[in-house]
Amino acid sequence: MIVILLIFVVHFLADFVFQSSKMATGKSKSFKWLSIHVGVYGLVSLISAFIIGFNISDMRWALIWWGINVGLHFVVDFFTSKITSRFWEQKNMRLFFVMIGFDQLLHNLCLITTYFLMIGLAMVDR
């Protein structure tokens, strides 16, 4: 349970704290800014891979988990950033924040689903 909480904390840091305003506003319109955001996200979220690797005693599966989640983060943000940007421009703050919440729900589902998948694969691999 502690590992899952740590994954969520690192995700929050990687996705919000280390995301600049330029990344946040640019990622919906520019592949470059989306890539920069996901690159920063990937570097910060590497902390989670080490936490998982230590927890399951297999760094290989932890790094696979990390790579999958960086890729999934790119895909999720590619779509959700465009939708949130549209709501922001329409000044529809209710739907803007609903979409931000949905974006985070998708990210967290990806993180947890792949975490349990990697635990299972690491156990079968032993």
Image: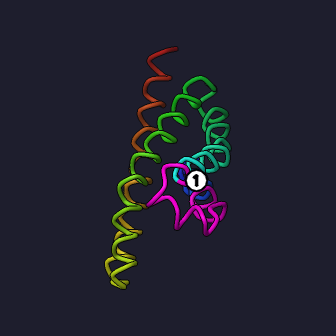
Secondary element at image label 1: helix
Q: Amino acid at mark 1?
A: His
Q: Is residue 7 above or below residue 119?
A: below
Tell me the quarter of the picture where residue 55 sits.
top right
User: Could you tell me residue 105's position as x and y percent?
Assistant: 39, 60
Residue at x 55% of width, y 54% of height: 33
Task: Give the quadrant of residue 56.
Answer: top right
In the rendered image, the vertical position of residue 84 relative to residue 111, given as above or below: below
The magenta-colored residue range is: 12-33
Q: Residue at x 47, y 35 (%)?
A: 68
Across and down, in percent, residue 77 comes to 43, 54
Mark 1, residues whose alpha carbon is within 10 Å: few (<14), some, or many (≥20)? many
Is-magenta flag for residue 24?
A: yes
- Residue shown at 60% from the left, 50% from the top: 36
For image coordinates 55% across by 56% down, the residue present is 8
Q: Picture quarter containing residue 47?
A: top right
Q: Position of residue 19 (x, y in %)?
A: 62, 62
Q: Is residue 37 found left or right of 28 in the rendered image?
A: right
76 or 53, nearer to the observer: 76
Look at mark 1 in the image and give the residue it sits on. 37
Residue 30, x across and y down, in percent: 49, 55
The answer to whether 101 is drawn above or below residue 62 in the figure is below
Membership of 42 in magenta stretch: no
